[in-house]
Amino acid sequence: MIERLNKGHSPPQIAVRLPLDFPDDESTRIAGESIYQALFVQGRGALRQELSVDKALQSERISRKPTSKLPVRSNRPWLEGCRLADRSQKLVDEHSGRALAGQWEGDMLAGPHDSGLITLVERTSRYMFIGRLPGLRDSAAVTDRLTEMISGLPQALQQSLAWDQGQEMAQHPRFSVATDCPVYFCNPHSPWQWPNNESQNGHLRWDFPKGTNFNPITDQ
């Protein structure tokens, strides 16, 4: 294999050729991808050091991303199946037409020292809840605070919650189980998909501009 790499043969060519060169030696069976991995992934290991030239491959590349037929793994798995486009047509009609109370838009105003406010606006009435976070802005704290804010409402007013794609909602299934209120995520950079909340947050920022530490501010 080393000899063929030094001659410029590609790993796929070598993988096909080895069984022909050594038909009785099962230990010579190896996939071309495994040869690539040995060359590039294993920290320039022993195989790489045995090559007489550093750029032995036909492409003369010195690094490589492994190929895969699997779909690209999302770095935001909590969004899967919970985007606005995944809603039922009935819920879409109720949400867009404001025909049914209980459709909420949510967001978080962040401040220094892990401070923050959760804002919830009901689309039909424009009623707004504001909940101060307890000096933490991780997903567990946000989920717990959201559950406290909405769980006291009648079930008829817990139809759905629209949120942006922030990581603070990574534990949203726990919120939905506790409240029976599904969460749907808006598209990136699309504030018109939660316009009431966006407008109300703009008003809040007049009194609490960016940089405000919400931790010492009382609920009153």
Image (spheres, grey):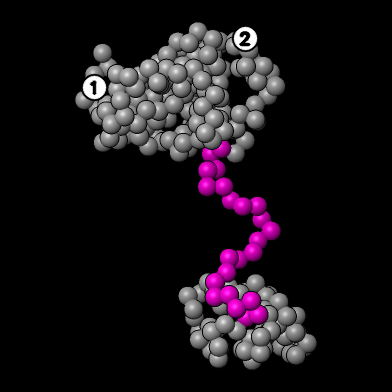
Q: Quarter of the image containing the N terminus?
A: bottom right
Q: Position of residue 164 (x, y in %)?
A: 50, 31
Q: How far apart are the alpha carbons under marks 2 and 1? A: 36 Å
Q: Taking 52 as reference, is 112 above or below it?
A: above
Residue 185 spot, x, y in % from top left: 55, 31
Q: What's the residue at 52%, 43% (across, down)?
A: 76
What secondary structure predominates along the stretch shown in magenta? loop
Q: Does the magenta stretch include residue 155?
A: no
Q: Image point 54% across, 30% down: which residue?
A: 190
Q: In this view, does 172 lie above or below 47?
A: above
Question: Bounds of the magenta span?
Answer: 57-79
Q: Which residue is drawn at 64% across and 64% down?
A: 67
- Badges 2 and 1: C-beta atoms under 8 Å apart? no
Q: Is mark 2 on a helix, strand or loop?
A: loop
Q: Residues within 10 Å of mark 1 (few under 14, many from 20)?
A: few
Q: Is residue 57 above or below residue 171?
A: below
**Which image quadrant for residue 70?**
bottom right
**Residue 196 percent across, percent down from the top left:** 49, 17
Q: Name the residue tied to disc 2.
A: 99
Q: Where is residue 10 in the image (x, y as percent from the top left)?
A: 68, 80
Q: Residue at x 37, y 28 (%)?
A: 109
The picture quadrant where one finds residue 39 is bottom right
Residue under numbered circle 1: 217
The amino acid pointed to by label 2 is Ala
Identified by mark 1, the residue type is Ile
**Of callouts 2 and 1, which one flags the residue occurring earlier in the amino acid sequence?**
2
Q: Which quadrant, please, contains the C terminus?
A: top left
Viewer can see residue 88? yes
